[in-house]
C-alpha cells in the first residue's frame, strides 16, 4: 500500500495515469451539465411562489457544494504535502485554489442575483453569506500566498497552514443557517431524510450536482497537470513529451 | 414537458429572464474559461520547451 | 510512521484544533451579534435596543396587513409564536412578501413599541413545489377545513 502511495506521489506517473481519465471526465461533465441546464431551464416546473427565478438553484447549489467540498480537497492535499513531503500533494493544493475561488464566486454571484427577486436585496450581511465571502477570501489568500515566496517549500508550508486554519470555516458555512437567525433559508438537501423539494425539480438538480463533481475532478486534474509540467520542465520526461508532440 | 408557451416566453421567464439568464451566462462562461485556460497554458509551456530544445540541438551538434 | 512525520502530523492537528477553538470561542462570544435579526419575543422582553437601527424578523400574521389606499404606507404584524410586533413601512414590499410567510425588517423601534421599517425583505423557506402541486395541497387544506366546519355544524 505504501509503495502505491509513493508511486502515486510521482508526478510523471500521475501525469500519464490522469491522461486516461481526462476524456471520460470531460465527456461526463459536458453531457451531465448540458442535460441538467436544459432540464432545469426549460423542463423543470417553476416554483409556486418564486416562479422562474428559482431555476438559478441549478447553478447555485452545485457550485456551493463544490466550493465547500473543494476546500477540503485543498486542505487535505496541503496536510498530506506537509506531513509526507509529497510534492504532488503541494501541486494539487495549488491547483485546487483558483478552481475553488471561481466556484465560490459563482455561488455568491448567482445567490446575489437570486436574492433580488426573492428577498428584495442583492446582498445582506447574514451569517451564511458572510461566511461564504470569508471562504472566497481564504481561496484568494492561498492563491496570493502560493505566488509570493521564492522557495517552493516555504510557499507550500505557508499555504498548507492557511488552508488548515481555514477548514474551521466550512462547518460554520454549513451550519450557519441552523445556528443563527439568517435571511438565507436552511438546507433543502439534507444528509438524513428526503429533500424538501418536489421530485420533478430535484432530479435535474441531482444531475447538475453530479455534473459539477465531474467538472471539478476534470479541472483539478487539468490544473495539476499544468502545474506538473511547469515544475518538472527541466526533467527529461517532460522534454521528451515536448519533443514528441 | 416544455414549460413555456413559446420561445419568447422561455426567454422572458415571466419577468425573471434577466436574473436567470445573467446567472447562467456568467457561471457557464466562467466554467468554460476554467476548463480551457489550463489547456492553453499547457500548450504554451510545451511549445516553448520544444522551441528551446530545437535551438539547442543544432548548437550541440556543430 | 517516522518520528519526523509524526511530529508534522501533530503540527497539522494542533493547527486545526487551535483554529477551531479560537473561532468557536469568538463566535460564541459574538453569538447575539451574528444573528441577523431580533425575534418579536426578544423585542417584547426588552432585549432589543430602542431608537437605533436594528432588524426584526418573524412570520407575517394572517389578516394583519393593512395598506393605505393613497400611499405606499403599509402596516403588519410579525410573530414568532410567542409574541407579536407591529411594523410600519413606507415603500414597495418585495414580490414574495405575503401573510403567513417570514419577513425581515430593518428600522428602528420607537418608544411606543411600534417598529418603523426602512427596508422589508421577504424570507422564504427551503421548500420548492410546482404550482399545480401547491394548488392541490392548498385545496386539500381547504377541503379539510370545510369538512371540519361542516362536521362542527352537524354537531351543533
Image (cartoon, coloured by chain):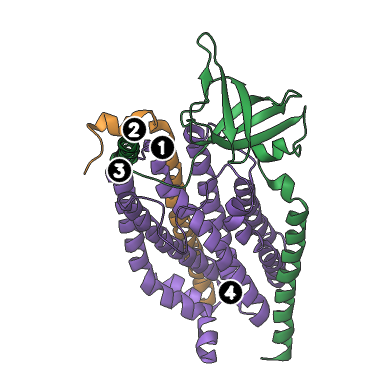
Chain colours: A purple, B orange, C green
Disc 2 + disc 1, Cβ < 8 Å: yes
**The one of A17 and C47 positioned closer to us in this rendering:** C47
For the residues labelled 2 and 1, the Cα–Cα distance comes to 8 Å
Q: Residues within 10 Å of mark 2 (few under 14, many from 20)?
A: many
Quarter of the rendering containing residue C114: top right
SS at mark 3 in the image: helix
Disc ID at residue A89:
4
Q: Assess disc 4: are there few (<14), some (14-19) or many (≥20) residues with their C-alpha within 10 Å of its C-alpha.
A: many
C136 to the left or right of A191: left
Numbered circles on residues, count: 4
Give the structural element (helix, strand or loop) at label 4.
helix
Asked if residue C25 shows in the view, the reply is: yes
Q: Chain of mark 2?
A: B
Q: Nearer the viewer, mark 4 or mark 1?
A: 1
Q: Quadrant of the C terminus of chain A?
A: bottom left
Q: Position of residue C14 (x, y in %)?
A: 74, 74
Q: Which mark is residue A53?
A: 1
The answer to whether residue C52 is left or right of residue A227 is: right
Q: CA distance from mark 3 to mark 2?
A: 20 Å
| Residue of label 3 | C133
Between circles 3 and 2, the one closer to the viewer is 3
- Specify the farthest residue to the top: C70
Residue at 65% across, 51% down: A134
Mark 1 falls on what kind of element?
Answer: helix
Tell me how far mark 2 sits from mark 4, CA to CA.
45 Å
User: Does residue B51 appear in the picture of this structure?
Assistant: no
- Asked if badge 2 and badge 1 are on a common chain, one would say no
Residue position marked by numbered label 2 in the rendering: B13
Q: Considering depth in this image, is A219 or C128 the residue closer to the camera?
A: C128
Chain under label 1? A
Q: Earlier in the sequence, mark 4 or mark 1?
A: 1
Task: Determine whether label 4 and label 1 are within 8 Å by CB.
Answer: no
Amino acid at each position: 500500500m505504501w509503495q502505491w502511495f509513493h508511486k502515486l506521489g510521482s508526478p510523471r506517473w500521475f501525469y500519464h495515469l490522469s491522461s486516461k481519465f481526462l476524456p471520460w471526465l470531460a465527456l461526463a461533465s459536458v453531457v451531465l451539465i448540458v442535460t441538467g441546464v436544459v432540464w432545469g431551464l426549460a423542463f423543470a416546473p417553476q416554483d409556486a411562489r418564486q416562479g422562474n427565478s428559482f431555476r438559478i438553484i441549478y447553478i447555485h447549489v452545485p457550485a456551493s457544494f463544490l466550493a465547500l467540498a473543494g476546500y477540503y480537497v485543498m486542505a487535505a492535499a496541503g496536510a498530506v504535502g506537509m506531513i509526507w513531503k509529497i510534492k504532488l500533494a503541494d501541486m494539487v493544493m495549488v491547483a485546487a485554489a483558483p478552481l475553488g475561488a471561481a466556484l465560490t464566486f459563482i455561488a455568491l454571484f448567482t445567490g446575489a442575483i437570486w436574492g433580488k427577486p426573492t428577498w428584495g436585496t442583492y446582498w445582506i450581511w447574514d451569517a451564511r453569506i458572510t461566511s461564504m465571502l470569508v471562504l472566497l477570501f481564504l481561496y484568494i489568500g492561498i492563491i496570493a500566498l502560493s505566488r509570493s515566496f521564492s522557495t517552493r517549500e516555504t510557499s507550500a508550508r505557508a499555504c498548507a497552514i492557511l488552508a488548515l486554519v481555514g477548514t474551521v470555516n466550512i462547518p460554520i458555512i454549513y451550519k450557519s443557517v441552523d445556528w443563527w437567525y439568517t435571511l438565507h433559508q436552511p438546507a433543502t438537501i439534507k444528509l438524513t431524510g428526503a429533500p424538501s423539494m418536489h421530485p420533478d425539480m430535484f432530479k435535474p438538480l441531482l444531475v447538475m450536482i453530479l455534473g459539477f463533481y465531474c467538472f471539478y475532478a476534470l479541472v483539478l486534474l487539468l490544473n495539476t497537470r499544468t502545474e506538473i509540467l511547469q515544475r518538472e520542465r527541466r526533467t527529461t520526461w517532460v522534454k521528451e513529451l515536448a519533443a514528441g508532440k | 414537458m416544455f414549460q413555456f408557451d413559446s420561445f419568447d416566453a422561455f426567454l422572458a421567464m415571466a419577468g425573471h429572464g434577466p436574473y436567470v439568464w445573467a446567472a447562467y451566462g456568467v457561471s457557464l462562461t466562467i466554467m468554460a474559461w476554467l476548463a480551457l485556460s489550463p489547456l492553453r497554458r499547457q500548450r504554451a509551456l510545451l511549445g516553448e520547451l520544444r522551441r528551446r530544445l530545437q535551438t539547442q540541438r543544432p548548437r550541440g551538434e556543430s | 510512521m517516522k518520528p519526523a512525520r509524526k511530529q508534522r502530523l501533530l503540527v497539522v492537528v494542533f493547527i486545526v484544533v487551535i483554529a477551531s477553538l479560537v473561532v468557536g470561542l469568538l463566535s460564541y462570544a459574538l453569538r447575539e451579534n451574528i444573528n441577523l435579526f431580533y425575534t418579536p419575543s426578544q423585542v417584547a422582553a426588552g432585549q432589543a435596543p430602542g431608537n437605533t437601527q436594528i432588524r426584526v424578523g418573524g412570520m407575517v400574521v394572517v389578516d394583519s396587513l393593512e395598506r393605505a389606499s393613497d400611499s405606499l404606507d403599509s402596516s403588519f404584524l410579525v410573530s414568532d409564536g410567542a409574541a407579536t410586533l407591529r411594523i410600519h413601512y413606507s415603500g414597495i414590499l418585495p414580490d414574495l412578501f405575503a401573510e403567513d410567510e417570514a419577513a425581515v425588517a430593518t428600522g428602528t423601534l420607537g418608544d411606543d413599541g411600534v417598529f418603523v421599517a426602512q427596508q422589508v425583505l421577504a424570507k422564504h423557506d427551503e421548500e420548492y413545489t410546482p404550482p399545480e402541486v401547491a394548488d392541490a395541497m392548498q385545496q386539500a387544506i381547504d377541503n379539510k377545513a370545510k369538512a371540519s366546519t361542516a362536521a362542527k355544524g352537524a354537531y351543533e
